[in-house]
Amino acid sequence: MKIIYTVYESAPNCSFYNEIVFCLCPTRAYFCLICESAPKHTPNPMTLTLEDIARLAGTSRSTVSRVINGDVNVSVATRQRVKKVINELNFQPNLAARGLASGQTHILGLIVPMNVGSIFSDPFYPLLIQNISTTCTQRDYSIMLWLAAPEFERRTIHQVLYNGLIDGVIVSSMSLNDPIIQSLAESNLPFVAVGRNPNDDKTCYVDVDNFNGARAAVNHLYKLGRRRIATIAGPRDVIVGVDRLRGYQAALTENGLDYDPDLVVEGNFSDEGGYAAMQSLMPRKPDAVFATSDVMAVAAIRALQEAGYRVPEDVAVIGFDDISLASRSIPALTTVRQPIDMVGAGVVNMLIDMIEHPTSETHTMVLPTELIIRSSCGAELVKEKSL
């Protein structure tokens, strides 16, 4: 295939300095067809302009711009011709210029109010970020990630909300009183939260059914004959922690069990927190533990085993999340699966739809959970007794 490209230095031994004909081979090597030698410089996609693409595609600069910005009024033939040149030259549009022309940058902000050290201690966040990034790519958007510890949120977020760099925001903060939500509301930028806030009926969100997921876990333990069911809860100022604790309490009530505050210990969703919480619970003699995250559940199993308890014979354990660690633990962890992939896709698709089709409606999505039964809950022991 032959294309024409303007260069400012000739190929070796070639006297032509302006329009030089090149052949684009599958390896993206360019050769001068006039003197049959390689040029000193191959075209750099970072230096290409809309004018270059327009000339190579045999159309106007404005038409190229319309194709890049997804204008459906451009004819199919012209659109295909322009895209062919863009793909062959690996042309990357200038996002800032694109934003000025279209009013959109196709960049979404993702705010995670945690520091760098904390975010990788909980597998939930890397999985969430991965799924958000994948869906952004599928929708032709880029993602800009901010890791902001709570004390720095207002200053950091204020700087990025008003500079016109992003089209919308995904915020993964689960705090009931997080000031970031108010800052986002004041910015007038579209935004979607990961997780609902029971005190806020105006914020769009995607959440999982944490209440019924926790309720199902505790009901399962009751059906297996466990009666002193403890829980390692999350922080009380975190939405997820509140909803899962409510589900635990509801299941106790449904099964005629009293709520015992001594069987409730917070573990802050960390390995260290789960281990320490289980050590606190052991003197209170629970026969089952519902840990509100898999990380805490696996830590609780380790604490029990180190203290000489058998899991599940002496103490049954159920977690929440179904991260990869759950199936690899010994014994394999029974847990409540939350669809992190659907959460990531849901927040991105909801936000982009809000950007591209503005509305004053509040959009919400609550995704179901699933109880995944493995060895740590003792279900196999009950089956053996019934035989």
Image (cartoon, rainbow, N blue to C red):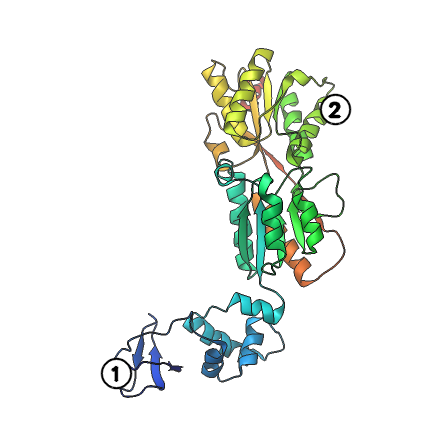
Q: Report which quarter residue 153 is drawn in.
A: top right
What's the residue type where badge 2 is placed? Glu
Near-viewer residue (309 or 180) = 180
Which residue carries the number 1 mark? 36
Report x, y in % for residue 286: 60, 15
Q: Report which quarter residue 328 is drawn in.
A: top left
Q: Is residue 361 above or below residue 15?
A: above
Please give the count of numbered marks on the rendered protein: 2
Per the image, label 1 sits on a secondary structure element best described as: loop
Which residue carries the number 2 mark? 254
Point 56% across, 46% down: residue: 341
How crowded pointer 2 is (Cα within 10 Å; few <14, some 14-19, many 20+) is rated as: few
Residue 225 appearing in the image: no
- Point out the tag, 1 or 2, that comes first from the N-terminus: 1
What's the residue type where badge 1 is placed? Glu
Q: Is residue 301 above or below residue 198?
A: above
- Quick check: marks 1 and 2 in contact, CB under 8 Å? no
Report x, y in % for residue 142: 53, 58
Report x, y in % for residue 266: 61, 24
Point 31% across, 80% down: residue: 9
Residue 290 appearing in the image: yes
